[in-house]
Amino acid sequence: MSALASLAEVGFDLTTLTTGELESRSPIDGRVLARLPRISRAQYDATVARSAEAFQAWRAVPAPRRGELVRLFGEAVRHHKPALAELITLEVGKIGSEAAGEVQEVIDICDFAVGLSRQLYGLTIASERKHHHMLERWQPLGPVGIITAFNFPMAVWCWNAALALVCGDTVLWKPSEKTPLTALALHRVLESVIANFADAPVGLSALLHGDRPVGEWLAEDTRLPLISATGSTRMGRDVGVKVAGRFGRTLLELGGNNAMIVSPTAAEDLAVRAITFAAAGTAGQRCTTLRRLYVHDSRYDAIMTRLKRAYGSLRVGSPQGADTLVGPLVDAAAFEAMQTALAAAKAAGGIVHHGERVHVAGLDGGYYVRPALVELAGPIEVSLKETFAPILYVFRYSTIEEAIAANNAVTQGLSSSLITQNLSEAELFLSAEGSDCGIANINIGPSGAEIGGAFGGEKETGGGRESGSDAWKAYMRRQTQTVNYSATLPLAQGVKFDIE
Ligand code: NAD
């Protein structure tokens, strides 16, 4: 029996999803998995109104009690983990362990949020006035719009939703139009928990199926004080301007162009494994995928020999196969973008290894590729851009300063890494003169973050931070409070204002 069967308990049944404008296609073979209706403008307006009303009630529920809802949700996700992972594999094409890893991220952020629900700490501040005290308190913000990308169809929503819910906000989720099924299944799990939770108001969390226009409605909607948007830099530029135009807040998690430096002292096995997982894993479709590799002159030939061998033997195929390491690209457009980038790199003098389409027996409708390595003498137009496919541009370098400058010489600023046994180089990379990215790793590739740290990037990656550390503050409003417990009214800065 398919693992999907457990989802019948929350009213999710793939065989009933047969009508609607949105088509869910499996990257495995291109077949249509389901059809779902797109939300209309009138339905959207009613849903946001319900969410705003629900916020009035939810903000008054004590935060630890809000955390209890998220705890129960995390428990329910544990129960449905195999089914949810199978759906990710079906709809996004992730191999089994990566799909299960994504569901685990959902569980982990729920655990994190539960603890956080008792730790929404403010400050006490010394007042300059006698018998006064000052506080900084964090208050719930309002209904939060969450726009997500196809490549992390569950985890990214939950990074936002789990924190927003414990912070006292209500949530509205517009998933990628490429992944409506995974969104529906996960949301049904949350709905089943909400239905049995006495303090949860109707409209606490909503799912808004649709494509780009629904994202635009959210961006323009003055009822939503925060829009958290994950996706391409093109999308973020559009959303960012619209939300700023109405003085709303954004949390933007956009494209990356992540680099790794392999230094003279790098441990070779570790480096080759880190490069291959970070560049070829998830078929190059992570925001943190390794896209640029800087190898020290003294190690270049040996590393390239190992990489060419590793890439040649990568098991490309159905993500449902137990041995597969590289599943399909999401669709034909992703394949075409990859081939266009490889052709441009070749035309600019790059030496291209692999990158060709792989035909998998019985899966002709899927776009499978052997990940590509491209040797370049220096940056070219296409290596400065994010092509959302497994292409790794490889460069030589001779000094660490030169390599760090190259790491930083792109418009994106998400993740970065250095493989070294040299303490001075490692410290330089992590210093103010080092990597300019939101994430900087030593002896780890740039992909595969843990939920405990704040996740996000600088420059055209958007500047947002989600998940761990103090990322929760984005979902709350900060209030400075001053209390006078004297019988007089001393004014700040010694100002006098005596009246008769
Ligand atoms: P995309 O930008 O095409 O779409 C993302 C979401 O935005 C979808 O839900 C889409 O419907 C919506 N959207 C598109 N245009 C919009 C607009 N003008 N206004 C409002 N909403 C709009 O991205 P994608 O192809 O789904 O995902 C891949 C991209 O996402 C890559 O660039 C990747 O690096 C990025 N990404 C970033 C992170 C991160 O945390 N930094 C995480 C995952 C993916």
Image (cartoon, rainbow, N blue to C red):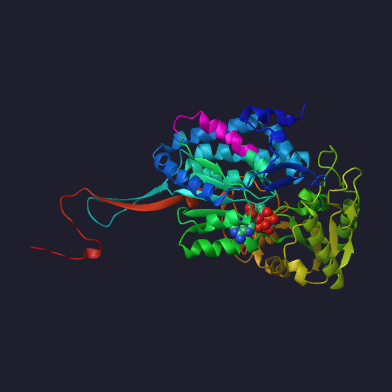
Q: Is residue 303 left or right of residue 75?
A: right
Q: Which residues are magenta?
A: 185-199
Q: Indicate the quadrant of ligand 1 in the picture.
A: bottom right
Q: Position of residue 406 (x, y in %)?
A: 72, 68
| Residue 193 falls in image quadrant | top right
- 405 is higher (above) or lower (below) than 465: below
Residue farthest along the left direction in this orientation: 500
Q: Is residue 155 left or right of residue 418?
A: left
- Residue pictured at 18% horizontal, 49% vertical: 486
Q: Position of residue 38 (x, y in %)?
A: 62, 47
Magenta stretch contains residue 415: no
Front residue (pair 64, 285): 285
- 500 is higher (above) or lower (below) than 88: below
Front residue (pair 458, 29): 29
Q: Is residue 189 visible?
A: yes
- Residue pictured at 83% horizontal, 51% vertical: 367
Q: Is residue 390 visible?
A: no
The quadrant of the picture occupied by the N terminus is: top right
The quadrant of the picture occupied by the C terminus is: bottom left
Type of secondary structure dominating the magenta stretch: helix
Magenta stretch contains residue 186: yes
Q: How many marks?
A: 0
